Image: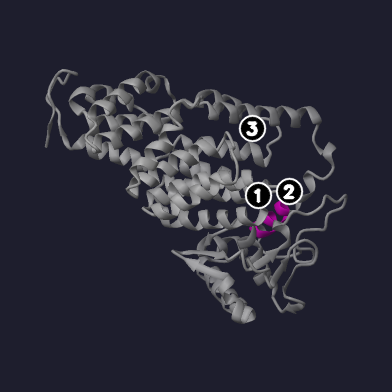
């Protein structure tokens, strides 16, 4: 990747440079660039409301004029400022932003946008102050009592461990305690992840955006971008989600940290499968597996890769990939790998093998708290042998919530296609409508 020729300085006196030439940018343009660089894709109304204290019509007019002037200033580089499906965003591969880079710790870090925070809308001034404070709060390590920091950090780690073991209720307890102490970007990220997993996408997005605002400038925003993308996926808004996932991928490639890349990829591959881009999902999955083995993300990548392989007709590859997951210690991963394998066996006419996998996973799915695993099992059961499994499938997903709207929709579609006799028991035959 070529080195960006445009440079946006936000720490200290802000300026936009093309190589060594300082480009003439007014304050509104610099503020607009700062928000897009640090907060990612934004709709016009949100930007206008943040940047100007004015009636909506006037604020939107100001935004249009600012965009027009900025594009003229950028000239042949105006393509860094992009708009897609109602969202404005920067192509961060073509512009270097100092506030997004890994900077050495300094006792007195430069002020955020120095000299440009004496006037403007109250909302923007508050946003800029928050950006400045987040870069200063972590500088003196004694800014918060050590015990308080340690406790919140410990609770957040406990919550992540509980999540990795499908103990959602336990994770909820830990994260609620952590939120009572020193709220760091990591605490907010874990809270957002759990909230999205529970299907509360809008609340999860708010928590993730707050995590982004609290993020230390030496840390990559890639995983937070990916999580925000996931919240849009949860709501079925896949076009908006794609923009966030692409931003996450760009951010992950910049830092070249394998663990960050794999966590980002675990979100993006799922999105690519859901939107039917199985070739790219498989390619990204294989790229992620080459980064190394990470217990918190690699198993999820393998399951998503196997789903992509199955959709591409690479049946043996898919079964082999799923097979490596079937004995995984995390129950939800094991269940999903086995029931997805069962669906493949059923399509191949190997119904006895499919039934064995359903029977083997049924006790585990009854104990599992993870909503997606329960919907995956119930859907597979109805597709493979509804006459045997209808009651168990219905019970399995009763009052269950998941952030995977796709598997929920598939379950509802399959269930609705079955004719259900009154007083249905596990021995009553089912017919297709």
The residue carrying mark 3 is 179
Task: Give SS at disc 2.
Answer: helix
Report if the CB atoms under discs 2 and 3 are less than 8 Å apart: no
Marks 1 and 3, how far apart at CA: 16 Å
Task: Give SS at disc 3.
Answer: loop
Span highlighted in magenta in the image: 123-131
Give how far across and how far down residue 152 sits, in percent: 69, 30
Task: Give SS at disc 1.
Answer: helix
Closer to us: 286 or 424: 286
Q: Give the quarter of the image for residue 69.
A: bottom right
Q: How is the image coloured?
A: one colour
The answer to whether residue 404 is seen in the rendering is: yes
Residue 126 in magenta stretch: yes
Q: Is residue 249 above or below residue 96?
A: above
Closer to us: 118 or 7: 7
The answer to whether residue 228 is seen in the rendering is: no
Q: Is residue 42 above or below residue 371?
A: below
Say whether disc 2 or disc 3 marks the residue closer to the N-terminus. Answer: 2
In the displayed structure image, the side of residue 305 where residue 101 appears, left or right: right
Report if the CB atoms under discs 2 and 1 are less than 8 Å apart: yes
The residue carrying mark 1 is 213
Quadrant position of the C terminus in the picture: top left
Using the image, tell me which numbered label, if any, was put on residue 134.
Answer: 2
Say whether disc 1 or disc 3 marks the residue closer to the N-terminus. Answer: 3
């Amino acid at each position: 990747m070529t080195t960006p020729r445009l440079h946006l300085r936000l720490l200290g006196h802000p300026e936009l440079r093309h190589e060594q030439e300082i480009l003439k940018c007014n304050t509104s343009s610099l503020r607009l660039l700062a928000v897009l660089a640090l907060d990612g894709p934004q709709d016009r109304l949100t930007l206008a409301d943040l940047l100007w204290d004015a009636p909506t019509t006037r604020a939107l007019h100001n935004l249009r004029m600012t965009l027009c002037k900025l594009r003229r200033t950028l000239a042949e580089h105006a393509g860094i400022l992009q708009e897609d499906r109602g969202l404005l965003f920067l192509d961060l591969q073509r512009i270097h932003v100092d506030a997004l880079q890994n900077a050495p710790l300094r006792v007195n870090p430069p002020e955020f946008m120095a000299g440009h925070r004496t006037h403007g809308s109250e909302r923007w001034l508050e946003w800029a102050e928050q950006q400045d404070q987040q870069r200063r709060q972590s500088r003196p390590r004694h800014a918060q009592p050590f015990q308080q920091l340690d406790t919140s950090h410990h609770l957040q780690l406990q919550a992540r461990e509980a999540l990795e073991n499908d103990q959602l209720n336990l994770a909820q307890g830990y994260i609620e305690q952590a939120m009572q102490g020193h709220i760091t970007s990591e605490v907010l990220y874990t809270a957002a992840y759990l909230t999205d997993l529970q299907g509360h996408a809008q609340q999860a997005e708010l928590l993730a955006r707050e995590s982004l605002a609290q993020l230390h400038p030496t840390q990559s925003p890639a995983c937070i971008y990916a999580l925000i993308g996931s919240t849009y996926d949860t709501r079925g808004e896949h076009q908006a989600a794609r923009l966030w996932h692409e931003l996450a991928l760009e951010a992950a490639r910049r830092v070249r940290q394998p663990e960050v890349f794999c966590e980002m990829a675990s979100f993006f591959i799922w999105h690519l499968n859901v939107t039917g881009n199985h070739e790219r999902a498989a390619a990204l999955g294989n790229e992620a597996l080459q980064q190394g083995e990470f217990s918190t993300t690699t198993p999820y990548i393998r399951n998503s890769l196997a789903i992509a392989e199955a959709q591409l007709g690479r049946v043996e590859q898919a079964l082999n990939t799923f097979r490596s997951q079937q004995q995984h210690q995390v129950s939800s991963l094991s269940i999903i790998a086995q029931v997805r394998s069962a669906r493949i066996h059923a399509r191949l006419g190997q119904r006895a093998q499919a039934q064995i996998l359903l029977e083997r996973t049924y006790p585990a799915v009854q104990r599992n708290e993870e909503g997606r695993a329960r919907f995956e099992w119930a859907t597979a059961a109805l597709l493979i042998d509804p006459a045997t499994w209808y009651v168990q499938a219905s019970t399995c997903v009763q009052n269950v919530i998941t952030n995977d709207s796709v598997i929920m929709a598939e379950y509802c579609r399959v269930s609705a296609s079955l004719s259900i006799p009154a007083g249905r028991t596990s021995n009553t035959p089912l017919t297709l409508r």
